[in-house]
Amino acid sequence: MKKQISNIEIILLIAIISAAPPIATDLYLPAVPSMPAYFDTSEAVINFTLVGFFLFMAVGMLIFGPLSDKYGRKKPLLVSVFMFVVCAIFAATAINIWILVATRVLQGIAGGGMVALGTALVKDCFEGVRRQRTLVVVQAISVVAPVVSPILGAAIISFFDWRATFIAQGIIAALSLIFALRLIEPLPKSERNDIGVIKSIARLGIVGKNIAFTGLLICCAICGGPFMTYISAASYIYIDFFSLSPVEYSIYFGINASLSAVGAFLVIALQGKLTAKMSIIITTVLCILSGGLIIAFGELAPIGFLLTFAIYSLSSGFIRPIATNLLLEQQDKDTGSASSLINLVFTLCGSICMFMVSAPWSTYVFAVGFMVLVGSILSLLGIFALLKSKIEINGLN
């Protein structure tokens, strides 16, 4: 009987498949300004390669997660990784913009599958403390990857052209095959769905009807969504509003984004000292405090915005792995579908917050502070409503 790969190898596998999609989104950003001239097209059309990837990544989450509950994790994982790598190669060799857009759409579907299956593997392969620590690693990587990717992309295009950034994406994803090909299927046949493909995907609705799961998911996603507001508005805040140089901006941006990863690792340091209930309530209150401080003091100086937003970065980073672990605990079966919905709802909330940045705010600093404040208040009210209800939430009541 074959032996399962080691826990470290499983964690590396989950880390790579969780990091590859955000890397694929941001790695080629430094090359985007030069691409309209290369393809003789507009910036709007080039942006389809970004928007198409992001939108269809959500589609991939909804497809691969439920299918993994029917066919097991390994086969859908291999399909999504191979598809991601092949699309990266086709993108690197695209002869016109519409081939590039099409390959990015397909790559987005594959990336969505990788993200959903990464979360499902965490529950399949780990329990208790080890599961939460694994989620901390995944959370940290998902935050650091978008920060590091543009820097790495800029280094790549300083020696090569934009095509090399897609080759790099393919290489990073292909590294996961070192572990994925040797992975022993973690979902026994006895625990899989024995229904048709369409009905398997329809199980998303069954999972969504779990009020404990859906209510907690919405509360946590509303609190975490404003971080994407910061991602989309940071350059306007630091460069346009505070008149910092691009180098200074990258330092400030990197510090605040990295603090979210620090917050995730604090979960390990404080494990056993706080209950999940108290952890979520305390950090959500800190997020509310951060939103108020950003509005009051964030516009005074770059360091003022950095320090006031830092409270939210640490707190939201701390909440995410705890929340994901709690959400996975709400489902005994249909883990793939649950993983899909967790990643989808967090993605949608982040997308809505990014879209709201374009509203006519007085300043982008106020926009960030307002969304952090309102999102955190709504999240806390929702959590209190769940706790006071008769709904049984595993690990929280």
Image: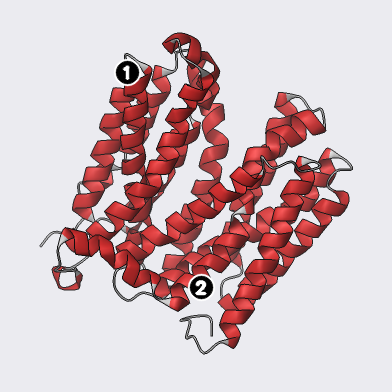
**Percent from the top left, x then y, of residue 364?**
75, 41
* Residue 215 - label: 2
Q: Earlier in the sequence, mark 2 or mark 1?
A: 1
Whether residues under marks 2 and 1 lie with C-beta atoms below 8 angstroms apart, the answer is no
| Residue plotted at (46% across, 53% down) | 138
* Residue type at tag 2: Gly
Farthest residue to the front: give it: 360
Mark 2 element type: helix
* Count of marks placed on residues: 2
Q: CA distance from mark 2 to mark 1?
A: 44 Å
Is residue 249 visible in the rendered image? The answer is yes
Q: Residues within 10 Å of mark 1 (few under 14, many from 20)?
A: some
Q: Nearer the viewer, residue 165 or 361?
A: 361
In the displayed structure, would residue 20 be above or below residue 286? Answer: above
Q: Which residue is mark 1?
A: 94
Say whether residue 302 is left or right of residue 121.
right
- How are the colours assigned in the image? secondary structure
Is residue 273 visible in the rendered image? The answer is no
In the displayed structure, would residue 25 be above or below residue 320? Answer: above
Farthest residue to the bottom: give it: 390
Say whether residue 173 is left or right of residue 1.
right
Q: Residues within 10 Å of mark 2 (few under 14, many from 20)?
A: some
Quadrant showing the C terminus: bottom right
| Residue plotted at (52% across, 14% down) | 34
**Percent from the top left, x then y, of residue 177?**
26, 42
* Residue type at tag 1: Ala
Q: Quadrant of residue 200?
A: bottom left
Farthest residue to the left: give it: 1
